[in-house]
Amino acid sequence: MPGYKVQVDTSKCIGCAQCYVACPNKVFAIINKKSVPVNPDACVGCRACIVKCPTNAITIVPRDIYAHYARFYKST
Amino acid sequence: MVPRSYKTDLWIDWCPGCGNFGILTAVVKAFEELGLDPSKTVIVSGIGCSSKIPHFVNVNGVHTIHGRAIAFATGIKLANPELTVVVHGGDGDLLGIGAGHFVTLGRRNLDIVVIMHNNGVYGLTKGQASPTLPMGVKTKALVKPNIQQALNPIALAISAGYTFVARGYAFDSEHLKNLIKMAIEHKGAAFIDVLQPCVTFNDVFTAEYYRKRVYKLDEQPEWNPVAEKPEERVEKMIKAIEKSFEWGERIPIGIFYIDKTQSTLEERYSQRIPLYPSIHPAKSNITRDVDKPLIDNNMFEKIFKEYIVDVEHI
């Protein structure tokens, strides 16, 4: 499977729901004012959430073949 | 069989949130589940954002000139009928400059899958209105609302003679994957119109817009798009065309029309040239004993001696 793994750093997340709005596949849900990737298999790796996140809390871990591009999957 | 990876290690440079990511995921999943041999599969594309897809899928790929993807694919498929040929293109690519080739493939009914990434704008060139943008709609990059009418790709494909016509939605990967699998297994020209949001230039047809409106035809109990007998064809075609004009509050996705009565171009050729499918250009020998041409000068003169005339050298 063309897997991507979405990780949210809960210490950085402020629950602004920008990722919930931006994600075209509804991977995220806001639970207790924190973003949680409840539907991780639906991630297609489009990076919309990373671009929107104001606190750089989201990381997408791509498969090994993309390891040399890992810096693009983190917000900076 | 060991599941293989169909993704290349290239950086995917579409905009964050682009619908092409969903389509790429669906294509890769469909290839994985069908277990296609990468050396026997070809992806042909034209020009546009969507047409970068051959670089990201690890099968044979040809990135051709604007609008001519179907023309290239026709040549590839006829030269080597053993290949699985998938054409990717945008709406501007296939229905704008490539409309002639699009209609011709329907008339020929060659066994090719055409996947159209339909986002309503020319995203690569800053968002001009494309053939599928409805009249009166004003997207971000247009100064005034669109002055031209929209073309209905489903109705065009059915009337052109495509024998498998469907519509998918880019971010319903599971549904789209099943459509692609069925299209590849179908014998004859297959066309999938994929609704795709453009996050950068199309602020009207967004992911939110489509998610609220799309519904699946397969879940409708009375919907049966398959024409098994020649006398059913016209009735099913008219029903499918009527359905394809449903747009607005509810947008149908799924299979619109399947025709099992038409012969493919390979079958038509094999009636005319009995040797064709078994001996095709890709399989024919072009040398004798490794390094000698099949027809050398002496043999050429022997074959054509009646037609060769000596002329005086001046």
Image (cartoon, rainbow, N blue to C red):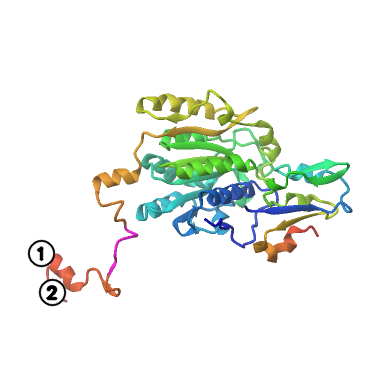
SS assignment at label 2: loop
As displayed, is residue B314 above or below residue A59? below
Residue B251 image-quadrant placement: top right
Q: Which residue type carries mark 2? A: Glu
Residue A74 seen by the camera: yes
Q: Is residue B43 left or right of residue A22?
A: left
Report the span colored magenta: B281-287
Q: Which residue type carries mark 1? A: Glu
Instruction: Estimate the x, y position of residue B54 in percent, counting from the top left.
Output: 54, 56
Residue A5 falls within the magenta-colored stretch: no
As displayed, is residue A73 above or below residue B21? below
Instruction: Choose the circle earlier in sequence order: 1 or 2.
Output: 1
Chain identifier of the residue bearing label 2 in the image? B
Q: CA distance from mark 1 to mark 2?
A: 18 Å
Tell me the residue that label 2 is attached to.
B312
Residue B99 seen by the camera: no
Q: Extreme left residue here?
A: B306
Instruction: Estimate the x, y position of residue B285 in percent, counting from the top left.
Output: 29, 65
Q: Residue at x 42, y 45 (%)?
A: B101
Instruction: Estimate the x, y position of residue B218 in percent, counting from the top left.
Output: 56, 31
Q: Nearer the viewer, residue B83 or B113?
A: B83
Q: Residue at x 49, y 27 (%)?
A: B224
Tell me the residue that label 1 is attached to.
B306
